[in-house]
Image: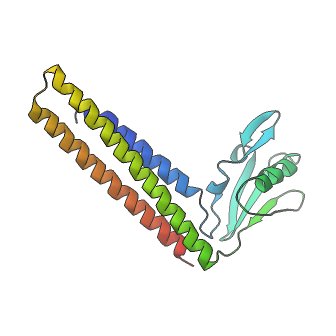
């Protein structure tokens, strides 16, 4: 593959990867430990991800269990969860924190699907912006003795890549929507 195309494909892959990572933090009624990925606790003066200071397990479909390696972290982890936008109330027994996920209402599920679609549109816009940047850079090649046919070929390749990544985003949105709507 042409290295002029490769760098734009890499950008599109990063966009898709970032979009998938963003969707993994949306809770779909089942316990998903990835919703804790963005949360940090103060560990000896350093903001540290919860996964690095505790053992996180999913003992039941709608429960996450967090077992800190140091007992002193229980309160800090609890505070981080309460301060986050997860909307969950942590229960702790002095050794373990349990997060119980309430069953999502039909209305909340539909709202989450709307959010997923909106984020999907944002990812598509990002991919199209990469295509536009690529096409702009190809136009500049005309001044560097690159034939019109070669530039047209590059534009066609970038359009095919764009179409492929837009389809990939649509598939990810559809799968996440099904996951959210499944009771």
In-front residue for pair 85/182: 85
Q: How is the image coloured?
A: rainbow
User: Residue visible at 52% across and 68% down?
Assistant: 113
Residue 3 in view, yes or no:
no
- The residue nearer to you, when weighing 5 against 71, is 5
Identified at 43% across, 56% down, the residue is: 121
Q: Residue at x 20, y 40 (%)?
A: 155
Viewer-proximal residue among 133 and 160: 133
Residue 35 in view: yes
Residue 16, given in percent of the width and then of the height, sits at 42, 49
Q: In terms of image quadrants, where is residue 112?
A: bottom right
Q: Is residue 121 left or right of residue 135?
A: right
Quarter of image, res 59: bottom right
Taking depth in this image into account, of 149 and 6 the one nearest to the observer is 149
Percent coordinates x, y for residue 9 in the rendering: 33, 40
- In the image, residue 159 above or below residue 120: above
* Residue ranking furthest to the top: 144
Q: Is residue 148 above or below residue 32?
A: above
Q: Return the x and y of residue 118 as percentages of the image width and height.
A: 49, 59
In this image, 177 relative to 100: left or right? left
The reply, left or right, for residue 182 in relation to residue 174 is right
- Residue 156 drawn at (x, y percent): 18, 44
Q: Quadrant of the C terminus?
A: bottom right
At a point 22% along the width and 33% down the height, the residue shown is 2
Label count reads 0
105 relative to 80, above or below: below
Q: Quadrant of the N terminus?
A: top left
């Amino acid at each position: 593959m042409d290295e002029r195309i490769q760098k734009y494909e890499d950008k599109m892959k990063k966009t898709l990867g970032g979009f998938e990572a963003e969707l993994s933090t949306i809770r779909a009624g089942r316990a998903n430990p990835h919703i804790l990925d963005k949360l940090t606790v103060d560990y000896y003066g350093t903001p540290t991800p919860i996964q690095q200071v505790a053992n996180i397990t999913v003992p039941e479909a709608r429960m996450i269990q967090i077992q800190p390696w140091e007992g002193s972290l229980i309160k800090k982890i609890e505070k981080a969860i309460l301060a986050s936008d997860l909307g969950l109330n942590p229960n702790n027994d002095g050794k373990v924190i349990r997060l119980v996920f309430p069953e999502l209402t039909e209305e909340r599920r539909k709202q989450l699907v709307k959010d997923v679609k909106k984020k999907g549109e944002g990812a598509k816009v990002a991919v199209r912006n990469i295509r536009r940047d690529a096409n702009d850079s190809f136009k500049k090649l005309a001044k560097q003795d690159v034939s019109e046919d070669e530039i047209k070929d590059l534009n066609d390749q970038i359009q095919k890549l764009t179409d492929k990544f837009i389809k990939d985003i649509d598939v990810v949105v559809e799968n996440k929507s099904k996951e959210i709507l499944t009771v």
